[in-house]
Amino acid sequence: MSDRPDIGDKLPDIAMETPDGGVVKPSDFKGHKLVLFFYPKDNTPGCTTENIDFSVLAPEFEAAGTKLLGISKDSAKKHQNFIAKHDLKAPLASDPEEDGLSDALGVWTEKKNYGRTYMGIERSTFLVDADGKIARVWRKVRVKGHAAEVLEAAKAL
């Protein structure tokens, strides 16, 4: 799919719901570097590990002038429970609507698991510069060591 935004492209500015029922969109972070990490589902092993890894490194991302935002299609209520259960420090957002940010970035995609085909979020991370342009893209992320790798890229930006 060549229509997916890539490095150098402006990040689409699409609103998402916060766990407290508010609204967040990428332009809210203008003037800061931003890491958007898309993950499939709250409270699953890989997604929990990824969120905890970003939470542990949250102070270092902050020191590097970089904001974090974890995004899945889970509801605001599920996010509240996920945050409380694991004491997560990285803010989360729900991207449940069709034509949401995950659609615009090409991470809502066809997946296969045990012979079953379904639509889901491809674990992906986007590092966005202070002007709202995509600086780095990681697709089909492997969780182990990923948050630390993203932190190094954020520091270098």
Image (tube, grey):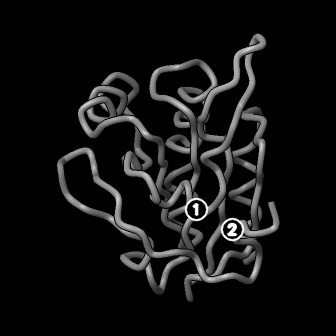
Mark 1 residue crowding within 10 angstroms, few (<14) / some (14–19) / many (20+): many
Residue drawn 76% across the image and 42% down it: 141
Q: Which residue is mark 1?
A: 35
The answer, for residue 92, to whether it is visible in the render is: no
Q: Is residue 17 left or right of residue 40?
A: left
The answer, for residue 65, to whether it is visible in the render is: yes
**How much space separates mark 2 and mark 1, taking CA atoms?**
8 Å
Res. 134 mark: none
Q: Nearer the viewer, residue 9 or 53?
A: 9
Residue drawn 45% across the image and 28% down it: 42
The single residue placed furthest to the left in the displayed view is 21
State the SS at label 2.
helix
Discs 2, 1 touching: Cβ within 8 Å: yes
Amino acid residing under circle 2: Ala
Mark positioned earlier in the residue sequence (2 or 1): 1
Seen in the picture, residue 56 relative to 131 is either above or below; the reply is: above
Quadrant in the picture for the C terminus:
bottom right
Q: Position of residue 132 (x, y in %)?
A: 56, 82
Residue drawn 43% across the image and 52% down it: 98
Q: Which residue is mark 2?
A: 154
Number of residue marks:
2
Q: Position of residue 138 (x, y in %)?
A: 77, 54
Q: Nearer the viewer, residue 115 or 8?
A: 115
Q: Nearer the viewer, residue 34 or 72?
A: 72
Q: Position of residue 47 (x, y in %)?
A: 57, 29
